[in-house]
Image (tube, grey):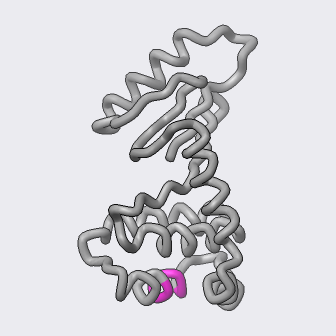
Amino acid sequence: KNRVRVVFHHLPLSIHTWARSAAESAACAQLQSSGAFWSIHDYLFAHQDEITPDNVKRKITKFAKNIEGLDFTQFQNCEENQMSLGLVLRDINLASANNVAATPTLFINGRRIQGVKDAAQLKQLLADAEAERSPQNGSTSVIGH
């Protein structure tokens, strides 16, 4: 917890026809709490084979009703009024400015890493980054799209 700082950025790729809508919904949860965001994030990844452009909002809305600590009325208002659109567009612009066009792309202590294959590879990358940093530099920073 004190050794690694993780920053997540939305990068809904156009090849995934429902990704932007999902990112906007996840960002609506993010505006309320990181726990609610990660719940929706995990749900989306676990159920991506079942999600389509036609059902994405319905599935997320149904799931979001049961997220503890999420004000569901506020969440729905956010979705209906696209209140998270600016957050998602900001992340897309940030990715573009850093020439990120694919996911996953990570920046570990400023070093760009694309296509991390699994948790074991990520753990090794983090261990390598931690070994390289000096004690006065603080935590290892992981930024992901």
Instruction: Answer above or below: position of 110 versus 134.
Output: below
Please state if 86 lies on the left or on the right of 10 as rendered.
right
Above-or-below relation of 17 to 112: below
Q: Position of residue 47 (x, y in %)?
A: 31, 71
Count the numbered circles shown. 0
The extreme left residue here reads: 49
- The percent position of residue 70, horizontal first and vertical second, equals 64, 78
Residue depicted at 52% across the width and 42% down the height: 144
Residue at 55%, 17% in the rendered image: 130
Give the image location of residue 14, x and y in percent: 40, 62
Q: Residue furthest right?
A: 136
Q: Please name the residue shown 43% across and 68% down the image.
A: 19
Residue 16 location, quadrant: bottom left
Q: For residue 64: magenta?
A: yes
User: Residues in magenta?
Assistant: 61-65
The secondary structure that dominates the magenta segment is helix
Give the image quarter of residue 84: bottom right
Q: Is residue 39 above or below residue 76?
A: above
Q: Quadrant of the N terminus?
A: top right
Depth check: 41 or 70 in front?
Answer: 41
Q: Residue at x 61, y 62 (%)?
A: 88
Residue 144 sits inside the magenta stretch? no
